[in-house]
Image (cartoon, helix red, strand yellow):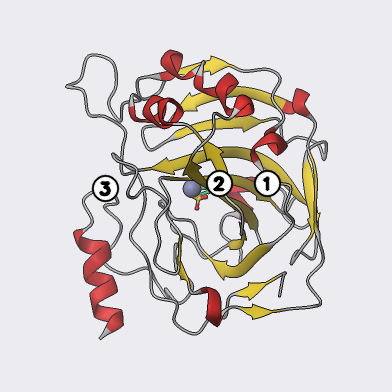
């Protein structure tokens, strides 16, 4: 049945040496979003995003992806509204991508992969004292997912792409002190939302996912810049950082809601 195959899928996937099964794994991510099965919820509010670009700190290659990290010691960069009961603080954003343009995103829409997916990670600092504690709680995190599609050059992304050669190897970091990530979020307010998990270890079921319906456009050179990064440290045999996405997980007893009709 679905459950054993998903356990097999997790066990087999080379990248995530995740445990054979996640304890009580009933809300794992990513999932396929079947547009026609999503349910319009008129009570969903618009998502309110207010980021302070000066809270940007650095870019770090952590050996899975590259993270742009923010100063989350105050409420200067937050999101509120949408499906959320509290405001959530921006901690970092990162991407997942493929070796080629045919795949790379973690979520799919009607089984379609995008070449890449952006995750903006926020945590519930109203209720929890630290990010590490929020990661363990059902309402601890809120992640905005934005699909990237091949198309026009993205000016805002280019400032980030220009810094990537400095973080080519695992565990390298470069200062990156002013960046407003809202330039990476489509202005169209439409989104899907569902209860899910982290897609990398510890895979905890602590994420309210907010997946933007509209993708952003980036060009081939910008996607290629992601693919020049390495999973490996300086001096090790080079392994290109590509296909850093988790396999699709079963929907189980969940409904995906939409903010639009
Ligand atoms: N890929 S993701 O689900 O957005 C995500 C977000 C934050 C995380 O913190 C740890 S630890 N693993 C994480 C995975
Ligand atoms: Zn992610």
**Is 75 drawn above or below residue 39 in the view shown?**
above
Residue under label 2, please give it: 119
Residue 210 percent coordinates (x, y): 63, 60
Residue 247 percent coordinates (x, y): 33, 60
First along the sequence among labels 1 and 2: 2
Q: CA distance from mark 1 to mark 3?
A: 30 Å
Q: Decide: marks 1, 3 in contact (CB < 8 A)? A: no
Name the front one of labels 1 and 2: 1
Residue under label 1, please give it: 186
Residue 34 percent coordinates (x, y): 49, 74
Which residue is at a point 30% across and 41% down the rendered structure image? 100
Residue under label 3, please give it: 15
Left or right, 172 with reference to 68? left
What secondary structure is found at the residue carrying circle 3? loop
Q: CA distance from mark 3 to mark 2?
A: 19 Å
**Is 104 drawn above or below residue 9 in the view shown?**
above
**Is 91 drawn above or below residue 23 in the view shown?**
above
């Amino acid at each position: 049945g679905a459950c054993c195959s998903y356990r097999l899928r997790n066990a087999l996937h080379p990248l995530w040496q995740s445990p054979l099964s996640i304890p009580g794994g009933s809300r794992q991510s990513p999932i396929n979003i079947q547009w026609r099965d999503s349910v319009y919820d008129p009570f969903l509010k618009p998502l309110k995003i207010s980021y302070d670009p000066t809270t940007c700190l650095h870019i770090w290659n952590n050996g899975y992806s590259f993270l742009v990290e923010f100063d989350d010691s105050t409420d200067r960069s937050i999101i509120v509204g949408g499906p959320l009961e509290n405001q959530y603080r921006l901690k970092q954003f990162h991407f997942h991508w493929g070796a080629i343009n045919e795949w790379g995103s973690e979520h799919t829409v009607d089984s379609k992969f995008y070449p890449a997916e952006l995750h903006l990670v926020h945590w519930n600092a109203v209720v929890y004292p630290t990010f590490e504690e929020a990661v363990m709680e059902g309402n601890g995190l809120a992640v905005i997912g934005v699909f990237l599609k091949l198309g026009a050059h993205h000016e805002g992304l280019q400032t980030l792409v220009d810094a990537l050669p400095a973080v080519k190897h695992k565990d390298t970091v470069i200062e990156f002190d002013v960046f407003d990530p809202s330039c990476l979020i489509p202005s169209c307010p439409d989104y899907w939302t569902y209860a899910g998990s982290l897609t990398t270890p510890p895979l905890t079921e602590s994420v309210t996912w907010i997946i933007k319906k509209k993708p952003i456009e980036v060009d081939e050179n910008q996607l290629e810049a992601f693919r020049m990064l390495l999973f490996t440290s300086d001096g090790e045999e080079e392994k290109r950082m590509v296909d850093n996405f988790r396999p699709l997980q079963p929907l189980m007893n969940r409904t995906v809601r939409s903010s639009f009709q």
